Amino acid sequence: MCGIVGYIGNEDVKETILSGLEKLEYRGYDSAGIAILNGNGLHIYKDKGRISHLREIVDFSINGTLGIGHTRWATHGKPNQINSHPHQSSTKRFTLVHNGIIENEEELIIEHLSDATFESDTDTEAIAQLIQKFSDEGNSTDRAIRYTLGLLEGSYALAIIDNENPEVIYAAKNKSPLLLGKGNGFNMIGSDAMAMIHHTNEFFELQDKEYAIITRQDIAIYNLQGRKIERETYFGELDATDIEKGTYPHYMIKEIDEQPFVIRRLIAAYQDEHGNLKVDSDILNQIRECDRIFIIACGTSYHAGMVGKFLFERITKKPTEIHISSEFVYNTPIISEKPLFVFISQSGETADSRAVLVKVKQMGYPTIAMTNVKGSTLYRETDYQLLLHAGPEIAVASTKAYTAQIAVLAIVACAASDSCNFNMLSELSIVANVMEALCDNRELYNELAKEFLTDKKSCFYIGRHVDYYTCLEAALKLKEISYIQTEGFAAGELKHGTIALIENCTPVIAIITQEQINLNTRSNIREVRARGAAVITMSLKRISSEKDQIVIDNVHEFLTPLVTAIPAQYLSYYAALQRGCDIDKPRNLAKSVTVE
Ligand code: F6R
């Protein structure tokens, strides 16, 4: 959500910033802007719409070696030209871009800015006005920024330019992500490494309530009291080719196809030299010693967590609860005496999950982050970490991170169990092979999407047992990228009301992987067929029936959610493709949801 790129160096800044913003497009945005400072002053271009539109309105004859850029996902005020960033103070001396939400904006305006006039509806403009005010009162820019930061409540990542000091970019952070990129003769700022990876792979981490003064030659980090902080750089693990689409038309299909490789990478990462499971012993002890596991997550990660509950209870025999982060934080259930909190988050930045983390840390409970992003907020702020090793996931709709989450949950559940009576790593290796065969069969899903989904307004996924969890995830995937209203439903529950919605030709996709519910789900299929539904059945080979359109090779009964996810992801992809949707950047959505 929102992206920031900044550059100060010797090269012209436009392409670096624009292409950096393009690398952040995956985070989700509805407007974009850039500010370039040169000897003739400051030049701002901004508007609602994509970076491709920003490229059209930027005057490419304007050159400059200092600039900041932004992609905005609207929170305060509509997505329009005026609300787009950068924003300026009323004298136009200070210009800034902001990611986050200032929670005490109204109080700040009443207390400090009652005479100021505002152009936009954003909370960001108040930050520029405050810096201006403190500067007008005779403070240095450095001090004016520090005074301002000291007053802000909420989240912010900021890049600030002072027109009167064209040799510096100021950066600051609290709760919203911001990295500082160290170059040779230049330095950069970015919401994440992807925005800078084509220029540098060496970074400084900026922590909450710190700010930085960035020149061409130097990056100096300070706390809000103005005390300098010594910090080492680190080298990122990201490779520039990891974030390219290559020959794929969309990141989503590239990421769907990558899943067999991700599973094999996980097998290698969680295996010791003797071929046994290898998981941090502190994590295993925490699991063994706790009296209850609380899984906390949102969206797709929440659906992976549902499978996680099943795996922890079946394999580890540990009572497990799964909670939606945004619910848990304000409607906290009774917590057991010795709980263990597991946060599942692809990005590691989700504000709803972080709010729970802050709360349970205050209560003194142990916490684990299961995330794809090393160094992300949840990774840094939890006691223990488990990495997903899925590689950067750029399409907004999560695919490979979802299956990686389930695989890591299965690995950890098995490693923590005294009685796991199967070899998890070799079962996962079978899963990887089955996934590969499913990927090779993608033309089938294309055809099924064309026949059953493309021109439909609504759809149902039905299943029982663990298949129900896949149905919830499959429904989310289909609705978020194709905009077909889809519900994931426990198959046995349909007859208690929802079956009223089944009409002639309503698509119903049934998933059946568990022997003990095979016949029950097939009865439910008959019930919807009798009411006119157009049914696609996806089953596992050992319980398949002749007419099932998607038959998946057998995998261990606990691991079926890993394979049923694949056809569902392709069905969503092809339905969205045939409907002409913006697959990698679905409307209204953001990849990393950094607001509550
Ligand atoms: C849907 C999707 C979202 C995320 C959710 C949580 O495809 O990606 O539902 O799963 O926003 O994000 P993370 O996992 O980054 O905490």
Image (cartoon, helix red, strand yellow):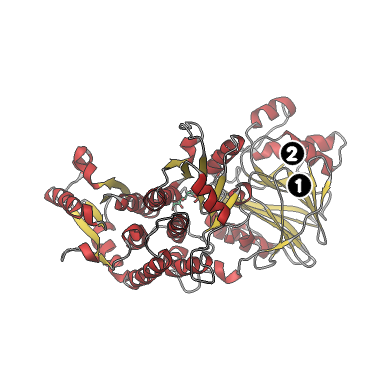
**Which labelled disc corresponds to residue 149?**
2
User: For the residue with label 1, is its CB less than 8 Å from the closest atom of ligand 1?
Assistant: no
Q: Nearer the viewer, residue 96 or 422?
A: 422
Tell me which label, 2 or 1, sits earlier in the chain: 2
Q: Quadrant of residue 56?
A: bottom right
The single residue placed furthest to the left in the displayed view is 530
Q: Is residue 49 visible?
A: no
Disc 2 on helix, strand or loop?
helix
Check if mark 2's residue and mark 1's residue have beta carbons within 8 Å.
yes
Image spot of residue 58 (x, y percent): 64, 58
Question: Label 2 is placed on what type of residue?
Answer: Leu
User: For the residue with label 2, is its CB less than 8 Å from the closest atom of ligand 1?
Assistant: no
Question: Label 1 is placed on what type of residue?
Answer: Tyr
Image spot of residue 314 (x, y percent): 36, 51
Taking 230 as reference, is 77 left or right?
left
Image spot of residue 29 (x, y percent): 54, 51
Q: Nearer the viewer, residue 551 or 414?
A: 414
Taking 546 as reference, is 321 left or right?
right
Taking 463 as reference, is 98 left or right?
right
- For label 2, count other residues whose C-alpha is less than 10 Å away and answer few (under 14), some (14-19) or many (20+): many
Mark 1, residue position: 211
- State the residue at coordinates (75%, 65%): 183
